[in-house]
């Protein structure tokens, strides 16, 4: 029996062909819109477009609950680890082993896991390397280097904390528009990786020396919300971006990874945190421990009391991430009383259920020479020589740190 419907040019095979053509046109338009904003006249690969991904933690991810960071088993995650800095250095030749630099980041990461019992690696990253020029076009070879380090850390059951580092370039004192571009890319790229956390900006350092209008409250306002200030010696204002905008940028890119907002005064000041906490989930706050701050800094005799004031009491309410401890010859925070104070610092951190990320596995700091399995030591040393030559220095906190990590560190999620 013949078909009762009238056949015409819009039926049968014609309709299928036209439908497929329409889908192709729509898909091309969507692709062009999504990528056009990420192309640069300078060439290179475009950065991936922002996609509307639900902001939910990937399976096995860290999460913040109350004043704790919890791992995938629900146990408190406490960082015990090291900073590696090669990818933030203007000279990326340190990525390759040489006679002057025998230990690469990869060598240090392997030693951190196998010998030092670390569970965390803090990787310093520079936007100057991530982007081609000052554009938002991503340098794919640099991103591949970062991916390689993150993959190595993951394979060794540790957490990677990616830190935006500007100091090696004498860069901005606080986050600026480059930080927004940086975290937009990083968040999209690592949103599905539960072994990566984001440290928003290394050592915020706007102070009265840089800004004549500085006050503690005004600095914290800039820290949280951003703003424009006229710096010393400048005629035009400089615009900074607040930590809240960086958090919002990361979440808008679909990433629920834990983020860390470092405190002011080069990550040593959380004094006004209760008035300037950030909005959102999975947010922790960074603090670098040291061996004395306050009126008599850096040689305060009442150091344990200052530790309680600076971070111990706060950690009872807020999730605090203890970060890059430094105490070595030439360091601005070097303290000759280290042999007595460092064991007390470890005890205080342990009592507050906090860890430490140490700077670094470099000669004369954490290790003797280039031997990644020979820690510096305070054995027989009663007073630390803060002017010693790093190349030959053997005194330091390495041995105490190794024992502490060995006694307390647990693999990520295990």
Image (tube, rainbow, N blue to C red):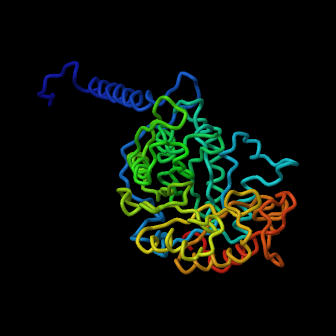
Seen from the viewer's position, the closer of residues 83 and 131 is: 83
Q: Position of residue 46 (x, y in %)?
A: 52, 32
Residue at image coords 84%, 67%: 394
Q: In the rendered view of the protein, which quadrant contains the N terminus? A: top left
Q: In the rendered view of the protein, which quadrant contains the C terminus? A: bottom right
On screen, 53 above or below 336?
above
Q: What is the quadrant of residue 7 in the picture?
A: top left
Q: Position of residue 307 (x, y in %)?
A: 55, 72
On screen, 151 above or below 23?
below
Seen from the viewer's position, the closer of residues 155 and 210 is: 210
Q: Position of residue 362 (x, y in %)?
A: 77, 58
Residue at image coords 49%, 66%: 320
Seen from the viewer's position, the closer of residues 344 and 372 is: 344
In the image, taking residue 325 as reference, residue 25 lies left or right, namely: left
Residue at image coords 58%, 35%: 131
Q: What is the quadrant of residue 155 in the picture?
A: bottom right
In the image, taking residue 37 as reference, residue 409 lies left or right, namely: right
Q: Position of residue 246 (x, y in %)?
A: 43, 47
């Amino acid at each position: 029996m013949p078909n009762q419907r009238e056949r015409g040019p819009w039926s049968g095979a014609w309709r299928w062909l036209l439908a497929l053509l329409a889908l192709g046109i729509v898909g091309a338009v969507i692709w062009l819109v999504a990528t056009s904003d990420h192309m640069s006249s300078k060439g290179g690969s475009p950065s991936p477009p922002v996609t509307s991904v639900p902001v939910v933690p990937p399976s096995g991810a860290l999460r913040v609950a109350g004043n704790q960071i919890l791992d995938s088993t629900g146990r408190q995650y406490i960082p015990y680890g090291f900073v590696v800095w090669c990818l933030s250095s203007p000279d990326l030749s340190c990525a390759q082993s040489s006679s002057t630099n025998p230990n690469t980041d990869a060598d240090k990461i392997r030693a951190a896991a196998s010998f030092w019992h670390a569970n965390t690696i803090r990787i310093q990253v520079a936007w100057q390397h991530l982007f081609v020029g000052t554009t938002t076009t991503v340098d794919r070879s640099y991103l591949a280097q970062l991916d390689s380090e993150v993959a190595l850390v993951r394979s060794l059951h540790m957490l990677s904390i990616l830190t935006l580092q500007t100091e090696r370039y004498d860069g901005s004192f606080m986050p600026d528009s480059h930080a927004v571009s940086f975290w937009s890319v990083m968040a999209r790229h690592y949103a599905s990786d539960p072994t990566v956390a984001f440290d928003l900006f290394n050592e915020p350092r706007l102070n009265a020396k840089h800004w004549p209008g500085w006050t503690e409250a005004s600095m914290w306002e800039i820290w949280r919300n951003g703003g424009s200030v006229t710096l010393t010696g400048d005629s035009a204002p400089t615009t900074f971006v607040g930590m809240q905008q960086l958090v919002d940028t990361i979440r808008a890119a679909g990433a629920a990874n834990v983020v860390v907002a470092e405190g002011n005064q080069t990550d040593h000041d959380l004094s006004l945190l209760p008035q300037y906490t950030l909005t959102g989930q999975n947010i922790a706050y960074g603090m670098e421990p040291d061996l004395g701050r306050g009126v008599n800094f850096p040689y305060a005799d009442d150091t344990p009391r200052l530790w309680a004031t600076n971070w111990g009491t706060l950690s009872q309410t807020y999730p605090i991430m203890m970060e890059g401890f430094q105490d070595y010859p030439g360091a601005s925070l070097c303290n000759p009383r280290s042999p007595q104070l460092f064991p007390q610092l470890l005890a205080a951190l342990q009592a507050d259920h906090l860890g430490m990320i140490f700077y670094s596995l470099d000669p004369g700091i954490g290790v003797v020479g280039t031997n990644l399995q020979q820690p510096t030591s305070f054995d027989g040393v009663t007073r630390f020589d803060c002017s010693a030559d790093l190349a030959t220095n053997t005194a330091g906190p390495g041995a105490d740190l190794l024992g502490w990590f060995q006694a307390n560190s647990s693999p990520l999620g295990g």
